[in-house]
Amino acid sequence: MNLQSDTIVSTKYKLLLLFLSLAGTCIILFITISNGAGISPDSVSYIATARHFAAGNGFLTYDSSPLLAQPPMYPAILGSIDFLLGIDPLLSANFVGAIFFGLILYLSGLVFLKNLSPLLAFLGTASLLVSIPLVSVSFMAWSEPTFIFFIVLSLFSFSIYVQKKNASSLLLFSFSAALACLTRYIGVILVFTGFIGILIVQHPHLKTKLLHAFTFAIISLLPIGIWVGRNYLLSGTLFGPRSSSLHSFSENLSLTMEVISRWFLPGRIVNSRPALMLLSLAIGFLSGIIFIWAKTPLLKLLKQIRPLVVFVLLYIFGYAGFLIISSSTTYYDTINNRLLSPITVPTTFLIFLIIQEFSKKTKEHCPSKPVEILVAIAIVFWLIYPARAIAVNTIRQIKESSNYGSPLWKNSETIQYIRENNLSDCTLYSNGDEAIYFFLNTTSKPIPTKSSGADTIANLSSLENHFPPEDKACVVWFSNLSNRSSLFTPDELLSVTHLEQTIQLNDGTIYVISKK
């Protein structure tokens, strides 16, 4: 394998990378040009926190409670743009996502070029341009693009550290890991991975190696440690209140494998057991050929670029393993493209590393040029699937009822009714209190919760003669919102309250109630 030096990166390749980076940025901007960034409940929290931060109020969410469930980096970026340029976070979110997507492509391309041939490095970067998980998170107002950028920056800085082993490369590696932790809590996996990575790097002095490893850990963990300490002082919890999971380990493991498979394979193959078996046999056959040709190709590969390969493998399995275990014990979103998107770049890197090794061994038995052409054609043909899937998934994601930036929500009759009618004498309760804040800049209260994950919070009898505590309340129930089964339904609330009026709208209902 021909490893490229940091300084020997051709101008031509840099221009190609710049083209892919700009293309990625433009794709996200094109997707968001009409309706802005996609908005989920998490997005509303980020945007509200960014506004509070810009106003000098600290890290508070839309209901003025402290931000606990997420670290502060992403809302701090949006808030800083608001403070410095006067651009509201809602308007800057799509540009931030687009810019970080472009930076991810460019920096990933540099990492690929260090370890792959120029052709495979370019094709690998191009595959990220049409990556299903990367595109799907980049046009939403989410922290994932920022987090993924810091992950790639960590890969890049670690590869520099492997070569130079000096203080500047160590600091760059440490700061990138620290910023990743301040963007997503699960970024701590990167710290443990980096610590082990530094220990396996060949170094003439064991004492210096240990000093570097512990310096990296301290710098990486100190900022997030301060933030978690702040959380504990404010709430008595490290990451906010958590509930027990509804899903078992085996369910989450199966779901993880299915989600990753769909990044690279059409659903008809993933859903077909015979097709998967056939594909597995083909991969096994090709792997056997490589093994016969190279005797022990994996050992040789690890010997050539051992630190980076081990770092990437540890990160992928560490991240996925932690996600599977934590989602089996703690209740949050079902494992999906969003949660797994941070392993996209490392996984793609490993796939193209394997392709390169196969191509190299094939060239020992076949003419070199035809092998390169066939591999390139096969990869381009393979990329047709994710490109088509992105087009379909993006259109669906833009129109989903869970996206507050969709036309469905912008034309909401329920939102319009609240906007045009004076409900100031009525305390608002809703199954979409974040939607009311987002569209009306009005604070409402969430409908009482009966369960969270596998944990029971309250029963209906506990509300009788106690809800609503105000003299008069309006329950705004949005029919567009799903996954709100943890809340008491209108029928349940009406059974323990006095109904004064019902306002039926095309996408929701407003119930005017009082205590019995």
Image (spheres, rainbow, N blue to C red):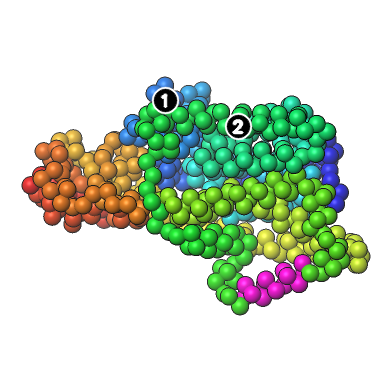
Residue 212, horizontal then vertical, whole percent: 71, 30
Which residue is found at the position 89% from the left and 63% from the top?
363
From this viewpoint, which residue is outermost toward the front?
Answer: 207
User: Of the residues shown, which amino acid type is indicated by label 1?
Assistant: Gly
Highlighted range, magenta = 275-287
- Give x and y (percent) for residue 163: 81, 36
Location of residue 188 with respect to 356 vertically, above or below: above
Q: Which residue is drawn at the image coordinates 39% and 23% (left, top)?
A: 57
Structural crowding at the residue carrying mark 2, measured as other residues with C-alpha within 10 Å and reported as few (<14), some (14–19) or many (≥20): many
* Residue tagged 1: 58
State which quadrant residue 438 falls in.
top left
Residue corresponding to mark 2: 220
Q: Position of residue 398 (x, y in %)?
A: 46, 52
Would residue 451 be counted in the magenta stretch? no
Residue 409 in the figure: left or right of residue 259: left
Q: In terms of depth relative to the viewer, which is nearer, 54 or 59?
A: 59
